[in-house]
Image (spheres, grey):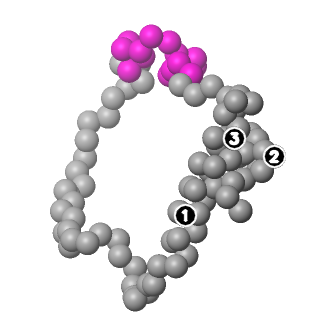
Amino acid sequence: MDKLTKEEVLHVAHLARIKVEDSEIEKYQIELKQLLDDVDQIKDIVVESQELLVTPVEHETILRNDSDTREVEFNMIKKNVPATNGNFVEVPVMVNE
């Protein structure tokens, strides 16, 4: 198969929450098929070792000692924020659904 069906392209567009114009469908039929074929090539990779590789370089993590810190009263924090609601700091919405 050289390209995906129109329905497959529209399904992928729906999953990605993107609008695809009718004029773009044929282009995406070919390009998405090529992309999926490239991803399928990963299955052909021969893995010589099952050892988990987290990082190719050894790192030694140096942690600081725990120590007591000065606590800040919420009343002090409230002075520096634009809006509060009871014991909560109100922040603007960053993600819309």
Which circle's residue, 1 or 3, is located before the other in the chain?
A: 3
Is 15 or 32 nearer to us in this picture? 32
Tell me which amino acid carries mark 1: Val
Tell me which amino acid carries mark 3: Glu
Magenta segment, which residues?
77-93
Is 93 or 50 nearer to us in this picture? 50
Mark 3 falls on what kind of element? Answer: helix
Write down the residue under mark 3. Answer: 26
Tell me which amino acid carries mark 2: Glu
- Report if the CB atoms under discs 1 and 2 are less than 8 Å apart: no
Q: Residue at x 69, y 41 (%)?
A: 26
Residue 59 vertical placement versus 85 (above, below): below
Which circle's residue, 1 or 2, is located before the other in the chain?
A: 2
Q: Residue at x 72, y 53 (%)?
A: 4
In the rendered image, the quadrant that contains the C terminus is top right
Answer with left or right where residue 42 lies relative to residue 22: left
Find the distance from the CA under tag 2 to the CA under tag 3. 11 Å
Which circle's residue, 2 or 3, is located before the other in the chain?
A: 2
Write down the residue under mark 2. Answer: 7
Residue 86 counted in the magenta span? yes
Residue 81 vertical placement versus 22 (above, below): above
